[in-house]
Image: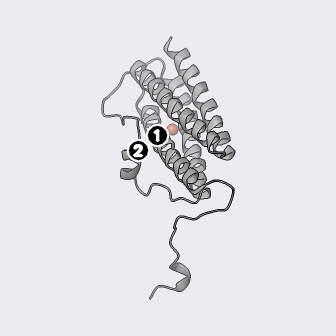
Amino acid sequence: MTAQVLKAKPHTEKPATGLSDAARKKVAESLGEVLANTMTLQVKTQVYHWNVVGPAFYSLHKLTEEHYNDLFGAADVIAERIRALGHITPLSNKALTAKTDIDEETSTRSAGEMVEQLIEDHEQLIRDARMAAKEAGEAGDMVTEDMLIARLAFHEQAVWMLRAIAS
Ligand SMILES: [Fe+2]
């Protein structure tokens, strides 16, 4: 028999923080998409970190390490914001994959192709996060808006660095 204390399950909540239920739901859904994109890009970036070869190996190996560590940390912050909004995070890789706009890697890539892929993916994520930040701002959720603005700053810097390598 399971002890009573172990029977609690997560459920949606309605924090009375001045945000409407509809706004919290909409922002939580958008954050689920940003989370899915962030986690897919984290795995893809780490796969490139492991597999990159050629004269650019060291710089790309190091840069991708910085990026996947940031993405890993960001996923936690984004998911915990969904919880703070009273919603439950996506529950599985399958659920995340259904929400992502970023294609997982299925080919062996040259260093240059990896950089191009990463630029495209960061740019896609920026476009999605910008929309989500705008929605959050319009809903009066400045905390999510602020968090997403910080994410935009990271991804825009990542695009700059990757473009500098590609040029
Ligand atoms: Fe490593």
Mark 1 Cβ and ligand 1 under 8 Å apart: no
Instruction: Out of 63 and 24, give the one closest to the viewer.
Output: 24
Q: Residue at x 50, y 34 (%)?
A: 128
Name the residue that disc number 1 marks: 37
Looking at the image, is 122 positioned above or below residue 160?
A: below
Depth check: give the residue in front, 133 or 58: 133
Expressed as whole percent of the image width and height from the top left, the position of residue 69 reads 57, 40
Cα distance between the residues tagged 1 and 2:
8 Å
Closer-to-camera residue (136/160)? 136
Residue closest to the far top: 167
Rendered image: mark on residue 89: none
Within 10 Å of disc 2 (Cα), the crowding (few <14, some 14-19, many 20+) is: some
| Residue located beneath label 2 in the image | 99
Residue at x-position 64% and y-position 35%: 149
Determine contact: label 1, label 2, CB under 8 Å: yes
Question: Taking 167 as reference, is 151 left or right?
Answer: right
Mark 1 belongs to which amino acid?
Asn
Residue 128 appears left or right of 151: left
Q: Quadrant of residue 97?
A: top left
Q: Out of 93 and 90, give the one closest to the viewer.
A: 90
Q: Which amino acid does label 2 sit on?
A: Lys
Closer to the camera: disc 1 or disc 2?
2
